[in-house]
Every structure is written in structure tokens, then in C-alpha cells.
Amino acid sequence: MFKLKELPYETNALEPVISKELLELHYGKHHATYTKNFNIAIEEYGLEDKSLDEIFAHISDYPKEVENHGGGYFNHQFFWESMAPVGSDDTRMGERMVELINKSFGSFENLQKEFEKQAVSLFGSGWVWLVENPNLNLLEIHQSFNQESPRMDFMIERNGDVNPLLNLDVWEHAYYPDYQNRRAEFVEKFWQIVNWRKAEERLLKNAE
Ligand code: MN
């Protein structure tokens, strides 16, 4: 049984970037529904004893609904934990992350430009991810469609064995109530609420 974890902050904590109403809808309806349907699917297909990692590592072997609901369950939980209130300590970038970003993209501005480009150009519904490539010790930016997730077997084949650090939901439901069709504006404002402390905590490779 996979549980809908509590949000790590109050539902108004991400204002003015994400309104209380939008967060309540996104978490309380969309994420809750993915969680509910994921649990129904794993019961139906006898996957109750498996961990999420195990399920994702063999996701291609299961019916598509396991991917859709399992990805929706995990991607949203990861997303809530990737954000923090505007101006909070968690939004400050540590030295290690600054160095890694400079090494990977040349500058934070370049990272932003590339991330925003991928977020805005993603056709339809999906996610944008900042990931660590532990083999190269570099950061990369990837897209995923619908509820695909970087640790799923076919995603590892597509993009390599990478470790996700941050994600951004660019499904319309993630921004429409606050921004209508202005996805680019939502993406631009996302930087104010990125939890860089969490992103750094998620790094696999120790600083050299
Ligand atoms: Mn969503």
C-alpha cells in the first residue's frame, strides 16, 4: 500500500508562485487520485510485495496503467519535496551545487535557459527533470512524457542511469488555474521556490 504523504509545508506556503487553491487541487485531487489508482493497480497485478524501485525497474513488464499511476504517484511526491517557500533557507543554493552547475552548464543562467526551453517546448503533458549523471559527475536536463519517470527501465535505456534531483510538472493542471495558458511564466517563477537544499541532498556522488 503506497500512502499519499503529507505535504512538507502548508498549502499556502508556495504563494505567490502557486496559489493555495491550485496546490489543494493538485495535491488533494490529482495526486490523491494517482495514489488511489496505483494501489488498485498493484493489487490487481499482484505487486503488493514490491518496492517502488523494484516496480520501476521492471515497469515495461506491467500493464501501462501501472506506469501511469505509479509515475503519477512518485513524480508528484518528488515534486512537492523539490519546492520550498519563497525566501526560505531551503531555496539557497549551496557551494557544491553552484560548482556542479557551473561545471555542467557553464552558469546558472545557462541551466535556466535550457530548463525553460525544455519545459516550454514539451508538447502535451509531462515533466522536466534536473538529473545527476553519476558516471560523468555532471548534471543534465531531461523531459519525460505523461507520467514517465527517470528510474523506470525504459527511461534508463533512453536517457541513461541517472539520478533525479528536481522535477517540474508541466501538465496543464499544474499551472492552468493560476496562469491559464502562460506556461512560460509559470516555469520562470518556479525558480523562486526550488528547494536547492533538497536537490543537493539527493546527489549520489560525494564532493571531490
Ligand atoms: Mn500534476
Image (cartoon, rainbow, N blue to C red):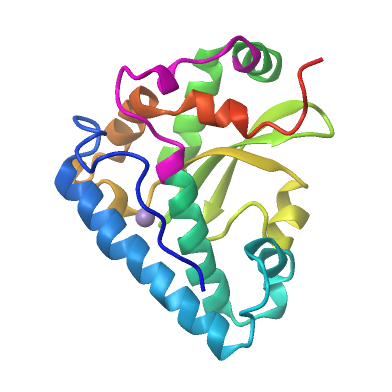
**Extent of the magenta region:** 80-97
| Lateral position of residue 149 relative to residue 170, left or right | right
Q: Residue at x 34, y 19 (%)?
A: 88
| Lateral position of residue 132 relative to residue 45, left or right | right
Residue 71 appears anywhere in the view:
yes
Q: Nearer the viewer, residue 183 or 160?
A: 160
Image-quadrant location for residue 151: bottom right
Q: Nearer the viewer, residue 83 or 142?
A: 83
Relative to 114, say whether 31 is above or below. below
Question: In the image, residue 90 lies at what x, y percent?
Answer: 43, 22
Q: Residue at x 40, y 61 (%)?
A: 4
**Location of the C terminus (image quadrant):** top right
Question: In the image, residue 18 lies at what x, y percent?
Answer: 24, 38
Question: In the image, residue 169 lies at what x, y percent?
Answer: 41, 47
Image-quadrant location for residue 32: bottom left
Image-quadrant location for residue 33: bottom left
| Lateral position of residue 20 relative to residue 59, left or right | left
Q: Is residue 90 magenta?
A: yes
Relative to 198, say whether 170 is above or below. below
Q: Residue at x 24, y 34 (%)?
A: 13
